[in-house]
Image: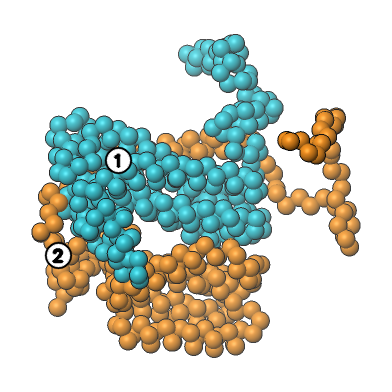
Amino acid sequence: MATTFHAALENLRTTRVWKSIFRRGPAITNRTRSVAVFGNLFLHWLPVKVREKSLRVRAAYYLGSLSFLLFLLLVITGVLLMFYYHPAAPNAYRDMKDLRFVVSNGVFLRNMHRIAAHLMVLLVFCHMFHVFYRGGYKPPHEFNWVIGVVLLLITLFLSYTGYLLPWDQLAFWAVTVGTNIVSAMPVIGSKVRFVALGGNIVGENALLRFYVLHVVILPLLAFLLIGVHFWRVQKDGGLTVRSKDDDGKN
Amino acid sequence: MMEKTKIESGFSSDAKKEPRRIVFITRNTSAKVKDDRGPELMTYPHLLVREAIVFEVLIIAMVVLALFWDAPLEQLANPLLTPNPAKAPWYFLGLQELLHYFPPFVAGILIPTLVLVALIMIPYFHVNVEGKPLWGEKASKRLAVVAAVTLGLLILLAVVDAWTIILPTVFVAALLVASYFSKATSGWMGSLRLKPLSWWVMTWFIATALCLTVVGTFFRGPGWSWVWPWGTHAV
């Protein structure tokens, strides 16, 4: 059974349709394996070959990969949540109730989005500290570190803008506390707060602004900078491998 | 009118062959092949299979978590009903804990800005790129400087009673001093003795941020008073 399936798959890979889609035959030689990476838009920012050392789990603990996966998961669950959400007060809160009591799997959907968001913040922090301890910011990786810091900020803002959207007491007061700090900024503090909230209090305008930031502006920025971040990893010579790693320990 | 200067253009012949570097000789060195990259593997399948497995494990973990851990939903937002305490999301609770000790400008604007600037500047300091140990040359002199800075900081923190910062600071300082006097050459103390200053600064920062966040999240109740996570109020 397994062999028949395998044979069928092998056959499929040699068909003209398969080749027209993937631009290559079966990836069984090193050449076609290379083409599988650089001939694919979604993989072309990866190197064709990777150092064995940087494949080890402790080289990065997959923290960057996991952060990226969580981002994708957040985009998918976020778009699904958008089908049920109106960025207006108090409709937003009613939509939360609908998600809990009316929408099929609404609770699960919201749980996934919420947990992924918190986990992403946590893992992005872990990723940054791990890169620091490995010296991953050292030349020629300096600028990619800076992009990473900006991505951390975007992650925090994404999470924070999303925090307001359920429009419950938790959301309202968390954002009120946070934005009150902004007014401590000298000279322009209250103006910045006014622009961020679209008014002097957290109201319907603030909800709309946070929503637009949360679902359009910040995700687009994040996508763009994640692209640059990944691309730079390869251009700057791959993951940092310390000379210490040579002895097979540590 | 348009074309005052004539620009000559044309096509030069394309390179027929790919240039290939055979040896690279810099001054005062002999030609040798420096291979510090180690063995390499094909990205397809080795890296991609690993990534796929990691992704699958994470998704399974996420689904399990989402099945058993419900996202909270409180009452409808009410500007007239302030909860006590009103808390920001957990990743800002370290800052909120700082607000307990420092004026809003210091805790909410100055310290975050300084942290951000410091993070961005890390790769551009170019001091001690080789990561030489703090307790290397001139160790006793450095100990004096480190002790003076730490004591100054602790006195400043004691003035504002900021003991959630004092605690991690004392902890990291204790490790620092212990590693100075230690004779260990292996184990965790042995590796501590080889750490550069940047390692110590970052570790202190993470320890402090962690302590502030944990206290702000689990140990603060009405009026930002101390409470235990299991619900009894401290006197």
Give the crowd class for mark 2: few <14, some 14-19, many >=20 residues within 10 Å.
few
On the image, the x and y values in percent for residue B204 come to 45, 72
Q: Left or right: where does residue B159 sit relative to residue B51?
A: left
Q: Is residue B178 above or below residue B192?
A: below
Q: Are marks 1 and 2 on the same chain?
A: no
Q: Write down the residue under mark 1.
A: A112
- Which image quarter: residue B211? bottom left
* Viewer can see residue B201: yes
On the image, the x and y values in percent for residue B166 come to 36, 79
Residue in front for this viewpoint, B228 or A81:
A81
Q: Left or right: where does residue B146 sit relative to residue B224?
A: right
Chain letter corresponding to the colour cyan: A
Tell me which chain the residue with mark 1 is part of.
A
Residue drawn 60% across and 34% down?
Answer: A44
* Viewer can see residue B95: no
On the image, the x and y values in percent for residue A29 come to 68, 25
Residue in front for this viewpoint, B67 or A5:
B67
Secondary structure under badge 1?
A: helix
Residue drawn 50% across and 46% down?
Answer: A225
- Give the number of the disc on residue B84: 2
The hue of chain B in the figure is orange
Q: Is residue B168 above or below residue B5?
A: below
- Give the number of the disc on residue A22: none
Instruction: Give the colour scheme shown.
Output: by chain
Q: Is residue A90 above or below residue A38?
A: below
On the image, the x and y values in percent for residue B121 come to 54, 65
What's the amino acid at mark 2? Answer: Asn
